[in-house]
Structures are given as structure tokens and as C-alpha cells.
Image (cartoon, rainbow, N blue to C red):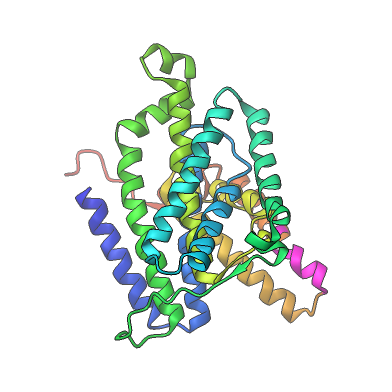
Amino acid sequence: MLRHLLLALAALAAIVALTFLVDPFTNIRIATVGYLLLAVAGLTVLTGLTGQISLGHGAFLFIGAYTVALLVVYVPSLPFWVDLLAAAAAAGLAGVLTGAAAARLHGPYLAGATLALAVGLPAVTQRFPDFLGGSNGLGFTVNSKPAGIDIPSTQWQAWIVWLTVLAALVLLANLTRGRVGRRLRAVRDDEVAAGLAGIHVGRTKITAFLVSAVCGGLAGGLQAFLLGTAAPGSFTPALSLGLLAAMVLGGVGSLWGALWGAVALVALQAGTEELAHALELGTDVANNLPLAAYGVVLIAVVMAFPQGIHGLVRRMRPVKPEGAA
């Protein structure tokens, strides 16, 4: 725990320093990397550590974003940190229900069930347009910056996002390295052997869904806080597929891999947008160019480095000679 806390504090200090050196738009991208990192980390627990393939992780971000939006709009007196906790709790409850329903599903059946969740849940906004804002979603403003701090709002938002993300990652890192993490890996490797060893397989799978959903709910709440809106168009199945691809690109089963995947997701999005603008491409082509570019990079990296970017980073580390201290 102490080691993880020190690493988190060092990372937070570096990010705070970086926000002073870049423009407000870059601060938004830095914050975007943060909440995507948390979302991919949650998916890593579910898919990378437990072996449950989910194509609907964006649904938990949807729940978190709309929970924050609804509380800010309808209960503005609540502190923002309470809104975030409520977003995590709401998404966690959805994760438990989803995990209980999917505990007996495997492979493509589980993937199909979670994909149906990602497709169907945003449609709820059309059934309750007066309450959820319909296709336009809910717009709001969170005044969380203290009056005495004279910095741009985007810089403050980046600090809040990364403070929340790093606190969650400290807890997640200790969880995955402890007894719970060993049970998750045991279920992933062999469910029969895990059951014979006394591990409750169904309960472990539900736990993985719970942890993953809480991370997704927090990420969605932070996204809504950063953008000042919660709209169904931000939580399409493409988001869930992008998060899954980011996990694979960064390195399956590794929290460091989640970082590389989130950075790659934001960098490729920014790069393709600039390329589309420079080439004056049409709207339809520009909108689909990031997905095409991400697919090409994903295929290339997986073929060259099956363990993802983090696997490449580990291979580049110097090997300690035998007998060295």
C-alpha cells in the first residue's frame, strides 16, 4: 500500500506540474487520459484478470455519467464528491446485477449479453426525455473550484480527475495483488480447479463485475464532470469496443497496460482529427477515420507484440546478470 501511495503522489505531482506547461485544450486531453485509464483498468480486472469478455463496459460509464448529471441538476446542494460516490454505487449495483445474470455465460454468449446492455441502455433516454434530456442529454455546470485558486477551470478539472483516478488505482492495485486478485486469476485459468480449491466461482465472477462497474461508473462521472454534459451519443457500442481494444493494445491483465492503452486512445483520436482537418476530408470520413486508424494500429501492435505495449516496455528493460545483487 505504501509503495502504491508514493507512486500515486509522485504521478499526481508530475501531472500538476505538466498542467502548468500546456494550454487549456491539452489539459482537457490530459484529463481524458485519466478517466479512460480508470475505465480500461476496470475492464482489465473483468476481462484481463478474470477472463470474462465484456463488450458493454460503456454502459457502466453511461450510468455513472447520468448519475452525476441528475444529481447536479436536481440536487445541486450535494458536494461533488458525493455525486461521484453515488455514481460509483449506482454503477456497482448494475455490475452486481449484470454479473449475477451473466455468471453462467461463457465466451460469445457473455459477450453478446454485455453488448446488448451497451446497445439498449442509452435508448432509455428516449423513453424518458423530460427526465433524461432525450437525444440532447443533460447539460450542467459543476462549480467545484475554491474561490481562492486562480487557475483556468480546465486545469482544475484535470487535477480533480487525476486525483480521483489515482486514488482509485491505488485501491485497485492493492486489490488485484491480494487474495481477491489471486482468486480472479485462478478462475480465469481453470474454473474447475478453482472450484475444487474452495473458490466460489460464481461469487468471484460477480466480484469482478462489481469492481469493473465501479471503475466504469467513476470514469463516466468524471467524463460528465469534465465535459459538463451527459448525452447518449457519448456511450455508443463504439465506446465499449474502443475500451476493449485499448486494453488489448496496452497489454491484457496489466494496470500499466491500461495506461498505455488510454494514452494511445487519446493520441490516435487527436492525431486523426488533425489529419482529417489538414486533408479537408468530409464529415463522414473524418468521423470514422479514428476508428480505422485505431484498428490498423491495434492489428499491427498485436501481431508484432502479442503482449501489447506494456509487454514491449518490459522486454526493453535491461536484464540483470545472474548473481548480481
Identify the magenta region.
Answer: 282-291
Count of labels in the image: 0
Magenta span main SS: helix
The image position of residue 323, as x and y in percent, is 20, 39
Above or below 56: residue 282: below
Judge from the rendering whether residue 287 lies leftward or rightward of residue 268; answer left or right. Answer: right
Q: Residue 144 falls in which quadrant of the image?
A: bottom left
Placement of 145 over or under 308, stated as above or below: below
In the rendered view, tell whether residue 145 sits above or below residue 111.
Answer: below
Residue 139 in the image: state x and y as whole percent.
59, 71
Q: Is residue 35 left or right of residue 319?
A: right
Q: Nearer the viewer, residue 248 or 138?
A: 138
Q: Residue at x 54, y 26 (%)?
A: 103
Q: Residue 170, position in %: x, y?
A: 31, 51
Q: Residue at x 44, y 25 (%)?
A: 203
Look at the image and tell me whether residue 263 can be seen: no
Q: Nearer the viewer, residue 122 or 23?
A: 122
In the picture, the quarter occupied by the C terminus is top left
Q: Is residue 25 visible?
A: yes
Residue found 67% across the figure and 41% down from its top: 115
Name, please, the residue furthest toward the top: 196
Q: Residue at x 58, y 46 (%)?
A: 57
Residue 189: x and y in percent read 47, 24
The residue furthest bottom is 150
In the figure, is residue 146 to the left or right of 185? Answer: left
